[in-house]
Image (cartoon, rainbow, N blue to C red):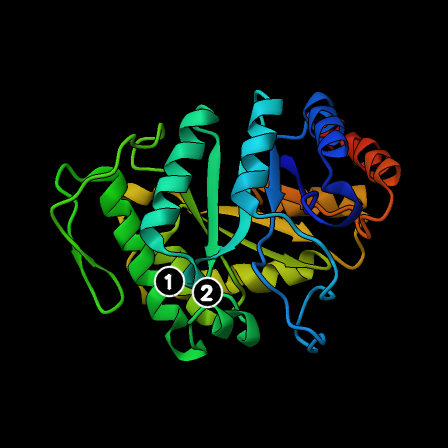
């Protein structure tokens, strides 16, 4: 099981100097991946389902990861997640391919349909169509990354007689990681993702997600070319990961365990958190 860090593109950790110091320190400590979230806009005043206050700053994930790519050499760079239906799929395919090239093939493109209705509506997407858009956008982007003559004709995306170069470094395009905790998310992960990403408070929460993924695997077919479904899990509430929890996550088959050093108010505290949890890496060696 590898250890990754999540969320350092927001609040007090988003400045260039702090990002440079924390990213280099994380790689030095042995963290294998660096993940960030996505919100283009936030509702103001805050609504109950919003994960952030309207005034909380958060950087664009792909721009942030491009900066981190230039600062690091080995860490994988993950979006956890991009709210896919509110992005133009041709533009996002170009951005993802560009970042994959510049990072030497380190991009993990985590996506999900989103759930925050005011944000989706402001970007022209209804809750009812977010799932359909997500599925079509994934298929359309893979056309652009892989086919000699890309072509797609769907309800939300329609193109032919065009190409987009450069192609991603990774064969087939960036590895796609599907986020979410619903039955639809589990089915999408099985059918369309190299991996799944989710969160919870303890190993029991993870087991519920794994049960949902197992049920989905009995309901939908997984293409052979996707390989084994990789599991990325982030512990929240509490954010401190006890060694016995880390051991149990590994036993349950987690590929990447992400730590989230909330509340992201003091960069020095975040660095201390990373140093403290790096002991989990040493224990697993």
Residue 37 or residue 123, whichever sits in front: 123
Q: Position of residue 10 (x, y in %)?
A: 71, 49
Q: In the rendered image of this protein, does residue 264 appear above or below residue 174? A: below
Residue under the image location 79 percent in, 35 percent down: 274
Is residue 110 rendered to the left or right of residue 37? left
Residue at x 41%, y 40% (from the top left corner): 96
Q: Which label number is shown at residue 52? A: none
Per the image, the residue denoted by label 2 is 113
Where is residue 223 shown, x and y percent of the image? 27, 50
In the rendered image of this protein, does residue 96 appear above or below residue 126? above
Q: Is residue 81 left or right of residue 49?
A: left
Q: Is residue 173 above or below residue 135?
A: above
Q: Kindly tell me whether residue 240 is visible in this rendering.
A: yes
- Which circle marks residue 134 in the picture? 1
Q: Quadrant of the C terminus?
A: top right
Compared to residue 46, the image places residue 27 above or below, namely: above
Q: Closest to the observer: 105 or 153?
A: 153
Callout 1: 10 Å neighbours few (<14), some, many (20+)?
many
Quarter of the image for residue 205 reads bottom right
Q: Do the residues under discs 2 and 1 have CB atoms within 8 angstroms?
A: yes
Q: CA distance from mark 2 to mark 1?
A: 6 Å
Horizontal and vertical percent for residue 267?
Answer: 83, 39
Q: Secondary structure under badge 2? A: loop
Q: Position of residue 131 (x, y in %)?
A: 39, 69
Question: Which residue sits at x=56%, y=46%?
Answer: 61
């Amino acid at each position: 099981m590898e250890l990754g860090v999540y969320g350092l593109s927001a609040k007090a950790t988003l400045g260039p100097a702090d990002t440079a110091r924390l990213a280099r320190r994380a790689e030095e400590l042995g963290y294998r991946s660096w993940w960030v979230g996505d919100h283009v806009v936030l509702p103001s005043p805050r609504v109950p389902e919003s994960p952030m206050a309207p005034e909380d700053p958060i950087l664009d994930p792909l721009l942030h990861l491009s900066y981190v790519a230039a600062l690091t050499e080995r860490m994988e760079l993950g979006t956890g997640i991009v709210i896919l239906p509110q992005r133009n799929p041709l533009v996002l395919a170009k951005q993802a391919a560009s970042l994959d090239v510049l990072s030497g093939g380190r991009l993990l493109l985590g996506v999900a349909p989103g759930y925050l209705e005011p944000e989706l509506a402001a970007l022209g997407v209804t809750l009812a169509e977010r799932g359909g858009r997500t599925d079509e956008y994934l298929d359309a982007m893979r056309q652009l990354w892989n086919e000699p003559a890309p072509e797609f004709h769907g309800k939300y995306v329609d193109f032919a007689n065009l190409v987009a170069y450069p192609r991603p470094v990774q064969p087939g395009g960036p590895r796609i990681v599907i986020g979410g905790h619903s039955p639809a998310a589990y089915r999408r992960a099985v059918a369309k993702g190299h991996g799944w990403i989710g969160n919870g408070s303890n190993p029991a929460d993870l087991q519920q997600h794994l049960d949902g993924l197992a049920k989905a695997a009995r309901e939908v077919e997984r293409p052979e070319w996707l390989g084994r479904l990789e599991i990325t899990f982030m512990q929240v509430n509490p954010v401190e990961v006890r060694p016995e929890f880390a051991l149990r996550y590994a036993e349950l088959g987690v590929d990447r365990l992400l730590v989230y050093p909330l509340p992201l108010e003091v960069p020095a505290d975040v660095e201390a958190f990373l140093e403290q949890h790096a002991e989990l890496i040493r224990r697993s060696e």
